[in-house]
Amino acid sequence: MRCLWCHNPEAFEPVMLAYDAEKCVSCGCCEYVCQNGVHAIRDGKHKVLWEKCRKCLRCIDACKSGALFQNSRDVSIAELLTEISKDKHFYQRSLGGVTFSGGEPVLWSDELQEVLSECKKNGMHTAIETAGNYSFDLLERLLEYTDLVIMDCKAYSEELHKKLTGQSNQQVLFNMERLSKLHKRMWVRIPVVWNMNIDFVEMEKIARFLEGKQIEKVELLPYHRMGIGKYKMYGQEYLINDAVIPTQAQLESCYQILSEHTVPI
């Protein structure tokens, strides 16, 4: 999916160049090593010509101030498990655990199955936070090692979902139905971008769909603007600058609609 309100643009592609203007000292090293003319430093100002970037990333190695960096790095399963295990005692004291989120973690189901299995062998509580937009068999193979599935519900209306995420929601709704019938622990999270994906009519539709399903709780996630700066950092255009944060009254009304349909909140 490519949700218009996504605050994780660093997950759009596996390899992306990022530029933090606040760390830049305009030394010119990146301009010197780049063969594609991505970096232009004139009068002490650094301009990044994103459309020219071919992701060779030589500029990152040349940058001594840390202003240029990559969005992600590959790690082995063993490295990941070592990192997770560092907090094992904290999980036990807090009754928490490890949550795999994204992007979409289930698209890495082979690797994720192995990591989840090892976490369970080590007595860790495991959760997956997922958008649900994939064949159910990808998720089903993970359920043996997963204590909790946190599923997104971005909109119920098909055309609205397509408009705002670029994808159909039919597989999402189907997967939620299947998961409910398996009596697996499930939370549902609903992002609330007022008058974009949610209004009172759309919340009523979502509440009717969720009514009667085996769901532990439903949470509303109010829209925030904390990710906007990252779009600039990755040379991406933020498309909903006019989106507003929902009011407390609007959120309370949404919770009231859910309650009226006996949806746990």
Image (spheres, helix red, strand yellow):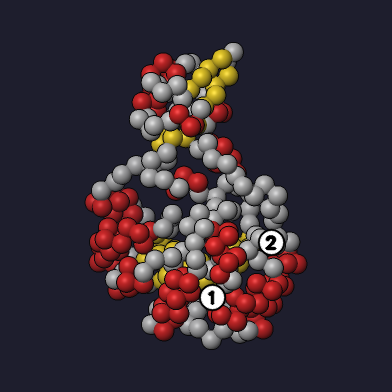
Of label 1 and label 2, which has the lower sequence position? 2
Q: Residue at x 38, y 33 (%)?
A: 55
Q: Which residue is situated farthest in the right direction here?
A: 249
List the residue tagged with mark 2: 194
Q: Quadrant of residue 162?
A: bottom right
Q: Position of residue 13 (x, y in %)?
A: 41, 45
Q: Residues within 10 Å of mark 2 (few under 14, many from 20)?
A: some
Q: Residues within 10 Å of mark 1 (few under 14, many from 20)?
A: some
Q: Is residue 119 visible to the viewer in this orientation of the structure?
A: no
Q: Residue at x 50, y 38 (%)?
A: 234
Q: Is residue 122 above or below residue 9?
A: below
Q: Is residue 54 above or below residue 134?
A: above
Q: Quadrant of residue 84?
A: bottom left
Q: Is residue 123 left or right of 39 when viewed as pictured?
A: left
| Amino acid type at image mark 2 | Trp
Front disc: 1 or 2? 2
Q: Is residue 218 visible to the viewer in this orientation of the structure?
A: yes
Element carrying mark 2: loop
Q: Which of the numbered marks, if any, corresponds to residue 217?
A: 1
Element carrying mark 1: strand
Q: Position of residue 211 (x, y in %)?
A: 57, 83
Q: Give me the C-alpha separation between circle 1 and circle 2.
A: 21 Å
- The quarter of the rendered structure image containing the C terminus is bottom right
| Amino acid type at image mark 1 | Lys
Observer-nearest residue: 122 or 61?
61
Q: Residue at x 69, y 77 (%)?
A: 256
Q: Position of residue 34 (x, y in %)?
A: 40, 21
Q: Position of residue 210 (x, y in %)?
A: 55, 80
Observer-nearest residue: 57 or 183?
57
Q: Which residue is situated farthest in the top direction here?
A: 43
Q: Residue at x 57, y 46 (%)?
A: 227
